[in-house]
Amino acid sequence: MQLPTEANQNEDDDPAQDSSDDLFELCLLNRRLLPQKLSLSQVQQISPSALAYVGDAIYELYVRMFYLWPQKRLENYHRLVVDQVRAETQALHLRMLTPYLRSNELEIVRRGRNSVSNRPKRLNPEIYQQATSLETLVGYLYLTDNERLIELLQQVHLEQ
């Protein structure tokens, strides 16, 4: 990954277009958002609900950074982000990603789906399970494999 600079930009390139993804990727790869390094065995001991809790925050941060450019009014940012982080959209994103998931990732998705107990009454249980599964996967990959997380998040936004 290379951040845009004056020296490496073509005249046709829009540096603002890729800068939010690049910044998010840089933060993840440098683990600036992670207060401590956890071992794989420690991560595997974290409950799916706790992974979903972390994944929800990371996913929303990614979406917020995705929409930073071009600049918009604050209420427009909010509307765009809310549309992307709502359960129905997250469920759609999980369905889009499923063909690309590895066996260990599918297992995390399954664990996330099975951990759902309480759901908002307005939501179909299957939709809520899928949204929670995506959040669980994001949380797990955030803690274990940032490069894979970036790859999958970019895949979701490339297919839209």
Image (cartoon, grey):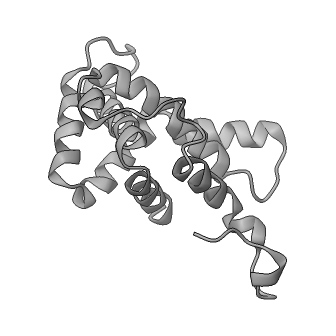
Q: Is residue 63 left or right of residue 109?
A: right
Residue 55's place in the image compared with 76, above or below, is: above
Tell me the residue at 76%/75% (across/down): 14
Say which quarter of the image contains residue 108: top left
Tell me the residue at 24%/38% (across/down): 109
Q: Give the total of numbered labels.
A: 0
Spot occupied by residue 78 in the image (x, y as percentages of width and height): 70, 36
Spot occupied by residue 119 in the image (x, y as percentages of width and height): 34, 15
Tell me the residue at 47%/31% (across/down): 56
Spot occupied by residue 146 in the image (x, y as percentages of width and height): 43, 50
Q: Which residue is at the far bottom? A: 11
Residue 79's place in the image compared with 104, above or below, is: above
Q: Is residue 67 left or right of residue 16?
A: left
Considering the image in quadrants, where does the N terminus appear? bottom right
Say which quarter of the image contains residue 143: top left
Spot occupied by residue 28 in the image (x, y as percentages of width and height): 54, 48
Tell me the residue at 82%/54% (across/down): 71
